[in-house]
Image (spheres, coloured by chain):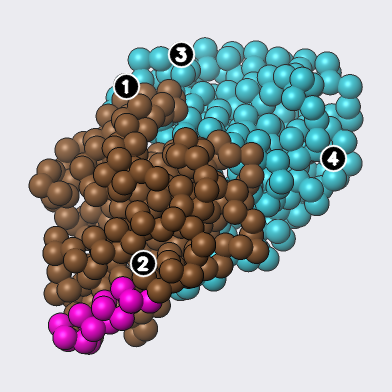
Chain colours: A cyan, B brown
Amino acid sequence: MRAADELRHAVEAYLDTLTLAPELGRLEDAVRYALGSGGKRIRPVLCLAVAEAAGGELEDALPAAAAVELVHTFSLVHDDLPALDDDVERRGRPSAHIAFGEGAALLAGDALLAEALRQALTYDDPAIARELVDATLGMIGGQHRDITGDDADLAEVERLKTGSLFSAAVGLGVRAAGVPDDDQAPWRTFGDELGLLFQVVDDLIDGDGFAVRLGATGARQLADETTDRAREGLEELSADVSVLRELVDVLAARTA
Amino acid sequence: MRAADELRHAVEAYLDTLTLAPELGRLEDAVRYALGSGGKRIRPVLCLAVAEAAGGELEDALPAAAAVELVHTFSLVHDDLPALDDDVERRGRPSAHIAFGEGAALLAGDALLAEALRQALTYDDPAIARELVDATLGMIGGQHRDITGDDADLAEVERLKTGSLFSAAVGLGVRAAGVPDDDQAPWRTFGDELGLLFQVVDDLIDGDGFAVRLGATGARQLADETTDRAREGLEELSADVSVLRELVDVLAARTA
């Protein structure tokens, strides 16, 4: 069982040495810039931790973990564009479209999504790529509800926007570990709780979303209840869930 | 053997009744708008014609053909955005971003790419989705060379931008028909010639690209030579290539 930090290093090393399609040419610079923005790699670490807890090998889960991070990065690059959030900074650096221009950033986002699928398709089992595509479509649908204000049901919007990819991180982890379909449900329930926890804490930090709808106290209470359910879900798994418990604690206590 | 027109009707019917991911919600409107723009469906018809000529069933090749058209449509929606070509019209109608706004068009393009992969992943053989992803990355790389002026080798840029997806249309067609890897080469060579032919004729119509580099006479000569090679390639296939020969003639004689 590797600690979360070791898993993060493994993800970083894998992403650093990722061979991109040579046809991308100089667009590779923008793709690598976006990928190297120093995020916390929560989703791929979750994917790897689940795979290890479920009895899988780290090496077998790395392409799946990278695929999830590539989809996440694709969504950030496109979200930052003037057509959507118009954010000029991302994690203390100029956004991709500031650094490389809007056209290149648009294409880099497209390339990140295609590269994600290329990673997911290194597996012989197409179920891994299918799950990633479905999660991506859910995420896109959530983003669209967000920009159109079609968000009467905030929990549903957040489940799509953020939860889809958290669920996929867990789903790809168990698949990469070879857990049979029939035994995946408790893992997936845990993934759903973790996605909700991440989003509620995010909204508490940013003072939007659930923090506005429920007030700070109500949102904190929802975060605490979700944390409890995530922890309880872990106890029901007959597996060494120590690293996953650590991830729950980190996400629950997050302040930035 | 169905005629090219019948194949086009089959593509249209399949696309019209395509079930999109329900999570897309109202974004489906923009996706369907882009898909219903009344193009000639050259790539999916080519895919189906190849599949039938190679002994496959139309029904088995329809998801692959649709996947190719979805990738093509994704690229048009993103190309039309102000960040790239800034085209306000597409085939006589407002571009997707004029009709639905830039943010929705950006997301609709992303959704089209993901839906393309979903179609390609309806097959148990992941090679079909892999080939589509590789072609998409080639196309994106070609678009990037185009906007950065990194196009000293015009033939290479065009091979990536247009040829990748033509090749994939043929490649997916032979795969859907179950042609073994070792027997695919002559089909693929034909696909490459057809992609080049399409692009040279396109440039002759638009008065750019090859028409500028080689002059109208030189480009016409290249088109004629490519047409001859495509026809010769067909004769070497031990298959009923009548519909494919018709497609070559249509592409060679195209004036719009």
Query: In terms of secondary structure, where does tag 1 sit?
Result: loop
Give residue A221's position: percent from left, percent from top.
59, 13
User: Which quadrant of the rendered structure holds the N terminus of chain A?
Assistant: top right
Tell which tag, 2 or 4, sits nearer the viewer. 2
The answer to whether A29 appears left or right of B162 in the picture is right
* Residue A30 visible (yes or no): no
Give residue A247's position: percent from left, percent from top.
73, 34
Give residue A72's position: percent from left, percent from top.
53, 44
Would you name the residue on which mark 4 appears?
Answer: A56
Marks 1 and 3, how far apart at CA: 18 Å
Give residue B249's position: percent from left, percent from top.
26, 64
Tell which tag, 1 or 3, sits nearer the viewer. 1
Would you name the residue on which mark 2 appears?
Answer: B194
Discs 4 and 1 share one subunit: yes
- Name the image quarter holding residue A152: top left
Marks 4 and 1, how far apart at CA: 40 Å
* Residue A38 visible (yes or no): yes
Q: Which label's residue is closer to the chain start, 1 or 3?
A: 1
Query: In terms of secondary structure, where does tag 3 sit?
Result: loop
Going by the numbered disc 2, the residue's amino acid type is: Leu
Magenta segment range?
A: B214-229
Chain letter belonging to callout 2: B
Discs 1 and 3 share one subunit: yes
Would you name the residue on which mark 1 appears?
Answer: A150
Residue located 72% across and 19% down the image:
A185
